[in-house]
Each structure stands twice: as structure tokens, then as C-alpha cells.
């Protein structure tokens, strides 16, 4: 059975890129462009994995991850960050992120990150 994924990024380009990379491997069940939408959609859809951009307007990925984890401690969140944002990654891990991928995305890295968090649950 395909893993369901919620794609969260304030850039439509990045969301589309991730959807293309995941197509055929996993099922993208929703997409959000900020942390507020991410939390609402997580509640609604209950995806297996969330790919969460770190830097977003309204509510950033770290705040949204904290909120999702407080609702569902078993949630799997993979942070998406640009190279050079190590400090943000530390904050994300403290917020409960299960893994991370760096932009520009490479298909093998994205699929591996999802497999890593999904196989931990299995």
C-alpha cells in the first residue's frame, strides 16, 4: 500500500516538484502553503508522512511540527530545508522532526527519507 504524504511548502514550484518526485512511489493526499494549513490538513487527512518546509509565512515549519506532534506523537514529519540552515535543522529536530531533506531535492534522497521514517513505524 502506498504511503500517504502531505506536502507543505510556501512555494508552489517546490510542492509540484515534490509531487513529481513522489508520483508512482507514494500518494500525495494534500498540500499546504503554510504551517496553519499544514496543521488543519494533518487533522483532516491523517497522512503517513508530512514533508514540511522550515521557512514559511504565517506559521513556520518548526511551529507547525510542534503542533502536529502535540496532536499526534506518532506523526512522521520530514523537514525540507535549504543547504546552510543547520541551526534551523537543530530546532526542527528538537520540535520532533523525524528526518530532513535539503533543497534542491534529489529523488533518491526524498524517497530514502520517506522510507526511513515509514520503516521505523512498520
Image (cartoon, rainbow, N blue to C red):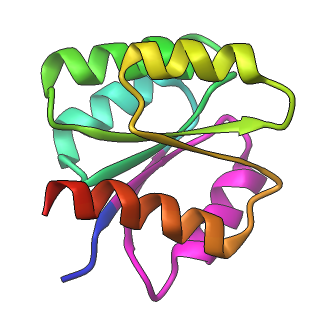
Q: Is residue 66 magenta?
A: no
Question: x and y percent of residue 35 in the render?
Answer: 48, 22
Read off the magenta span.
5-31
- Is 108 located above or below residue 87 in the figure? below
Using residue 19 as the reference point, say whether residue 55 is left or right of it: right
Q: Residue at x 77, y 55 (%)?
A: 13
Question: x and y percent of residue 19 in the render?
Answer: 57, 68
Residue 39 sits in quarter = top left
Question: x and y percent of residue 84 in the render?
Answer: 86, 28
Q: Residue at x 39, y 76 (%)?
A: 26
Residue 34 sits in quarter = top right
Asked if residue 56 shows in the view, the reply is no
Of 59 and 61, the residue lying toward us: 61
- Is 122 located above or below residue 2 in the figure? above
Q: Residue at x 19, y 15 (%)?
A: 70
Using residue 14 as the reference point, say whether residue 20 is left or right of it: left
Asked if residue 43 shows in the view, the reply is yes
Residue 106 sits in quarter = bottom right
**In the rendered image, which quarter contains the N terminus?**
bottom left
Question: x and y percent of residue 45 in the render?
Answer: 21, 48
Amino acid at each position: 500500500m502506498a504511503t500517504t504524504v502531505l506536502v507543505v511548502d510556501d512555494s508552489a514550484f517546490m510542492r509540484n516538484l515534490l509531487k513529481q518526485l513522489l508520483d508512482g512511489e507514494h500518494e500525495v493526499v494534500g498540500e499546504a502553503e503554510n504551517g496553519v494549513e499544514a496543521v488543519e490538513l494533518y487533522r483532516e487527512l491523517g497522512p503517513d508522512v508530512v514533508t514540511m518546509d522550515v521557512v514559511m509565512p504565517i506559521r513556520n515549519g518548526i511551529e507547525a511540527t510542534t503542533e502536529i506532534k502535540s496532536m499526534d506523537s506518532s506523526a512522521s514529519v520530514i523537514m525540507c530545508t535549504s543547504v546552510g540552515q543547520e541551526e534551523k535543522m537543530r530546532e526542527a529536530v528538537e520540535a520532533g522532526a523525524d528526518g530532513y531533506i535539503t533543497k534542491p531535492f534529489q529523488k533518491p534522497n526524498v524517497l530514502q527519507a520517506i522510507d526511513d521514517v515509514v520503516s521505523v513505524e512498520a
